[in-house]
Every structure is written in C-alpha cells, then in structure tokens.
Amino acid sequence: MNRSTIAVTVAAAALSFGLASAQAGPCSSEIAQFQQAVRASAGNPNAGPYGRQTVGAQLGEQPTPASIRRAQRRAQAAFAATLAHAKRLDARGDEGCFQALRMARDMYNLN
C-alpha cells in the first residue's frame, strides 16, 4: 500500500468511528436538557437533590447540623447514581433510560 491509500484508509476509519460514537441514545437530548437545567439552578439556594422526610422529622424532632449534612450527602449521592444509571442505559440504547431520568428529575428540586 502506498502512503495515500493508507492515509485514506485511516481517515475513513476515523470518520466512521466518529460517526458511530456520535450517535445519540434514546434519552440523550432529554438528559442534556436536564443537566443544563441543573447547571442553571446552581445559584438557587432552594434547588438541589433532596431525600424523603424521616420519621424523626415527622415526629417533630429537630435536625442537627451533622444530620443535615449527612442527609444532603445521601441525597446528592442517590441523585448522582440515578442520573449515571440513566446515562448508562442511554449509552446502551436501552429505553429504560426514560424511567431512570424521570427518577432523577423527581429527586431534584429545580424551583
């Protein structure tokens, strides 16, 4: 093979690889829109992931600063894991990404 044939072959392979990796999954645009909304809410003190109310809170017990930090970390970790799951499903082309994304949206207060 001469140099020009090799160059064309390498360029064609690179182009086809780029096209294959550029194909979006079924949820890609929705995930991107949601991530943009999350980034846009960064300055809003009321925005962010949240968890379920504990039994202690329902009984009127006051939270401590440490318990608030733990709850915030747990909520953030659960949200990040759920969004990552949606992305993995999307990358595989699995329509289950819609349900996982819906769960991530339900975990995040954008208001």
Image (cartoon, rainbow, N blue to C red):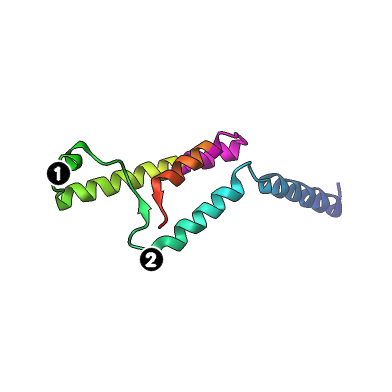
Residue tagged 2: 43
The 10 Å Cα crowd at callout 2, few under 14, some 14 to 19, many 20 or more, is: few
Residue range highlighted in magenta: 83-98
Looking at the image, residue 26 lies above or below residue 64: above
In the displayed orientation, state which residue is furthest to the front.
59
**What is the CA distance from the residue labelled 1 to the residue labelled 2?**
30 Å
Residue tagged 1: 60
Q: Residue at x 26, y 41 (%)?
A: 53
Quarter assignment of residue 44 = bottom left
Between disc 1 and disc 2, whose residue precedes? Answer: 2
Q: Helix, strand or loop at disc 1?
A: loop
For the residue pair 7 and 85, the one nearer the viewer reads as 85
Q: Residue at x 16, y 53 (%)?
A: 65
Q: Give residue 92's position: percent from left, percent from top.
A: 60, 36
The reply, left or right, for residue 51 in relation to residue 66 is right
For the residue pair 64 and 92, the one nearer the viewer reads as 64
Q: Amino acid at mark 2?
A: Gly
